[in-house]
Image (cartoon, rainbow, N blue to C red):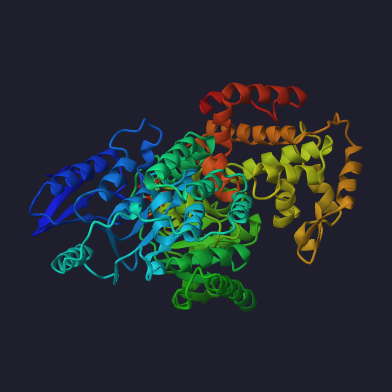
Amino acid sequence: MTSSVVQILKYSTVGVIEVNNPPVNALSQQVRQGIWESLENLENDNDIKAIIIHCIGKTFIAGADITEFGKPPVEPFLPDLVNKIENLSKPVIAALFGTSLGGGFEVALSCHYRVAVASAKVGLPEVNLGLLPGAGGTQRLPRILGTEKSLEMITSGKHYQVTEFENTALFDEIYQATVDLKAAAIDFATNMLEKRNLKVRAVGQQPVLQDISDWDSKINKISLKARGKKAPVVAAELLKNTQALSIEDGMKLEREAFLQLKDSEQSSALRYAFSIERLTTKLPFTANTLPVKRVAIIGGGTMGSGIATAFLASGYQIKLFEQNQQALDAGFERINDNFHRNVKSGRMSDEKMNSCLQHLELCLDYKQLSDVDLVVEAVFENIEVKQQLFKQLDAHCRPDCILASNTSYLDIEQLTDGVSHQQRIIGMHFFSPANIMKLVEVIKTQHSSEQALTTAVSIAKSLGKIPVLVGMCFGFAANRMYARYGREVQQMLLEGATIEQIDNTMTDWGMAMGPLSVQDLAGIDIGYNARKTRPKPEYDPGFFTASTVMVENGRLGRKTGKGFYLYENGKQIVDPQAQSLIDEAKGNFDFQQKDFTNEMIVERAMTAIISEGLSLFKEGIVQRLSDIDAIWLHGYGFPRHKGGPMFQGKVMGSTVISDRINQYRNQSCIEIWPDVDVQALD
Ligand code: T1G
């Protein structure tokens, strides 16, 4: 009995159901059907006394098939499949490796035994998709681990090393990572059969281990942490309300809650986010990637040291280049601190840190760059400085060495004018802190080769980053859109909104930080200096007046102890002085003052972002509207359960967006609210 994704193998009295559905053995309809039929086949086979569910490839089942969620469910439904496993007349053993997640872990929980390799991980990450475990996970896990641990696992959506459950009923055997898992599972079944110890142990027939006494305070904490996300709170309530029910009644309530969440906007936004961040690496061309092992990072400042840290942590050989020993030592210290923070937070072991740092070479002489495959420059954001640097790189690096600039807004073609082999020149714009933030804009100049771009995207992915291919324009895609957002909120400051109201409104709506707080964090002078490289738009008299006033009063943000806010001992404090500077500046204009509500602020800010995104798409700076959402999710702390600005635009629809743009254009001008193709949102 075989299908293209599930086959049966027989080893004496042990039947193995083998799943082979790359890339992650997701429980597609075909896989569910194949397992269902294989269970029936083996249950009716008198020679078979025990059944193993095993997968080949990189992992045991990693969950339901996310690509099926948007379509009507097709039988066999997963809850029915897991119940079939549990109620089978013969013992079923799950053999776990890789990441057994969601529905995959639920299949394992419905088995009568579970064995795993020590390197395996398990988890119920459904809340990350705006869902909850919908195939018995909320009912079986508490029957094995108790409600307290189950509540943590289900509402956090985290992945757990199986060794964490060594002395619990979750696993019957945990083998060394190098074991032949299928053989070990067959031995386990055979030995247990010989000892007549292999029983049909139905987890669902056991009582829930009710070890939570303070449900309300736990649920309250979960709700605060959820910051508007529904799924974790619904899951917690479900666990509380079903802990004393039978598995049948509990699964009925689980199913209802699951279906309700599945149809929610939050879940479609979170599922959208999951898929689009994997879409960004799909390029409109195919080219071989160049081999890159040795990378030179030029500049050991905040950005350069962060970028070097990211490369080192992913196993690259790094040459950190600076212009003098003092700067080089400072760069090394920053990298060292980054690694020590990783170790302190438990993200990295001491051994791993030491082996990474072994791959760091400190350089002062351009000649040392003659063998590198890629250079990422992160020197001072000044055209002349960068032009001088690129001349040196051209003279000392191999002609096929990719030269990437980390500039956030300078014209890369201008920086590299005269450099040989222009096809190897690109941008790789990391976001600060570069060892933490996932977004990398891979910037295509008019000469960049498809090979150089493909290589840069593949490298960014190997760093665990989200690369987005963007074209050349001032601020590329991310900063251009963020500047549009900044312009709109600062214009609202000139029309009556206050600093605190703007930031609180946007954070209450879900943004990780208020836009004015972001200015203070980054340094208000960064944008101010960037804008000074271009003429002030005649059509926009109020253009970034608030930032200008701050900078001209020495208020650059956190780094000077005050900007839009005051900073004392790291605490951000509302500063009436900042607001009065803006109120004073308002006197130079005759903008109609408005009594802003929070909704007005969000609506206008979102429409500005969506409008700029549509312009970027129309100009071909980005390949997809969803790439813009990946930028906002991973570059600017956009609330993941709202999908991204363009997802929001799709939810609101082209007519609403068009009407809003027209309304704002009438109060302003077409240069600020240009014609865009709103139909792209449909
Ligand atoms: N369904 C379909 N495709 C999936 C998938 C899934 N569950 N998970 C990953 N893929 C695809 C992914 O889109 C990409 O495709 C490729 O696999 C490699 O993924 C009833 C309802 C498993 C840790 O949430 O966390 O079960 O881009 O790049 O970095 O209660 O994928 O190559 O075309 O991420 O090695 C629960 C989600 C579902 C797991 C592997 N499960 N996946 O990471 O590879 S809901 C999840 C992951 C559920 C039940 C409920 C990761 C991974 P492509 P990748 P990776």
Question: Residue 558's spot in the image, x, y percent?
Answer: 76, 60
Instruction: Give the total of numbered labels.
Output: 0
Residue 287 horizontal/vertical position (percent): 34, 47
479 sits to left or right of 59: right
Q: Is residue 553 left or right of residue 81?
A: right
Instruction: Point out the image quarter for the N terminus.
Output: top left
Judging depth in this view, the residue of 143 and 177 nearest the camera is 143
- Asked if one can make out residue 289 in the rendered structure from this viewpoint, the answer is no
Residue at (74, 46) in percent of width and height: 503
Closer to us: 183 or 655: 183
Residue 105 in the image: above or below residue 191: above
Is 102 in front, or is 196?
Answer: 196
Check the image and report above or below for 667 versus 404. Answer: above
Q: Is residue 114 left or right of residue 382?
A: left
Instruction: Give the vertical position of 169 relative to 625 (above or below).
Output: below
5 vs 143: above or below: above
Q: Is residue 409 visible to the viewer in this orientation of the structure?
A: yes
Q: Position of residue 220 (x, y in %)?
A: 63, 52
Please report the residue visible at 57 percent of the width from the left and 45 percent of the height from the top.
229
Give the percent coordinates (x, y) of residue 13: 10, 59
